[in-house]
Image (spheres, grey):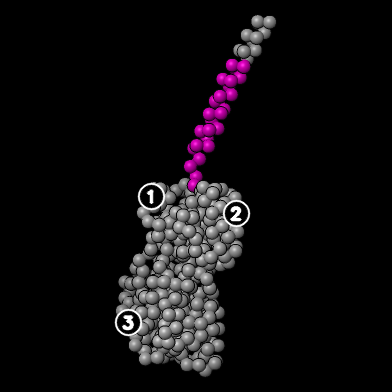
Amino acid sequence: MKKSVIVLVALLCAVSLFAAPKKKAKKADKKGDNTIKIGIINNPPSESGYRAANVKDFETVFTAAKGYKVSSFYSLKNDEQLNAASQFITDGVDYILLSAAATDGWTSVLKKAKQNGIKVFLFDRMINVSEDLYEAAVVSDMAKEGETAVNWLKAQNLGTYNVVHIQGAMGSDAQIGRTGALDAEFAKGTMKKVVQQTATWDEAEAKKIVESVINSKEDFNVIYAENDGMAKGAVAALDEAGITHGVNGKVVVMGFDCNKWALRELKAGNWNYDGQCSPFQAAVIENMISTGKVPSKKIISDEKGFDAKKITQSDIDTYGLGD
């Protein structure tokens, strides 16, 4: 009996010795996987030249070579973006990087992200949520962009301001900010709102809006388009109708984003103003992730506006987006 017990104990010890290394090896493998999972939610690159540059910036910075596994989702619809965020949470990403299609509706999903230990960084646009639901926001000051543009327009001393206002996607931070200062002038009566309509960042839709105004025979002398693509569509309508525009023309043309092709139109005198919106936020966010240091809750890009009478080739080379 004693011999049987001794043999049994010996066998159990042997099993333990062989089993132990397997447990340690599994733990080491798990610890050795340092991949950081990133879920990026953004507008599609086809939205505009700005967005194409923004998407490319994130693709360039968050690479597999740096230890990132990136999943991206693109949509102009807020509900689709919300669904994508929920899926990223289910997938167990480490970080969600978000440029929201609209400012509202994000509280619930970001609370869920926080509960699951997922850190959220906003980029490009702010949203209406409590600050404790995101780590930091690297954004443009859209309201300041609008104020800078409208202050420039007022400084032109046109005498009368009959404005065709072409808006971006309604409810987006960019649309709200770039609309605000102009709406204030409409409310004061210093400028007349000939039409105020969204083209949802689309060039062809902007062209249709201006064609409709031209056909109505209503007088206008300013086109305030909330991105370069819509300004381009508006100018196409003017050209087809034989209406002059730019520095020596009847209609003042204003755009935003500073694509190189748009700044060339500015330098040629075909447009009058273009407001800068920097798409380069990825490196700032990557630095915060890699170092674990967040210098500020809100980091605002330094931006300016460009005047056709003052812009230089150096400005185009330095600040222009794309080719």
Indicate the secondary structure of the residue bearing disc 1: loop
Against 302, residue 10 (above or below) is above
Extreme residue toward the top, this view: 2
Residue depicted at x 46% and y 65%: 125
- Callout 3 amino acid: Lys
Q: Quick one: label 1 or label 2, which is nearer the N terminus?
A: 2
Residue 302 position, x and y percent, is: 35, 66
Residue 77 position, x and y percent, is: 58, 66
Spatial separation of the CA atoms under disc 1 and disc 2: 27 Å
Q: Which residues are magenta?
A: 12-36
- Callout 2 amino acid: Gln
Q: Quadrant of residue 281?
A: bottom left
Residue 87 bears which disc, if any? 2
Residue tagged 1: 293
Residue tagged 3: 309
At label 2, counting other C-alpha atoms closer than 10 Å, the crowd grade (few under 14, some 14-19, many 20 or more) is: few
Indicate the secondary structure of the residue bearing disc 2: helix
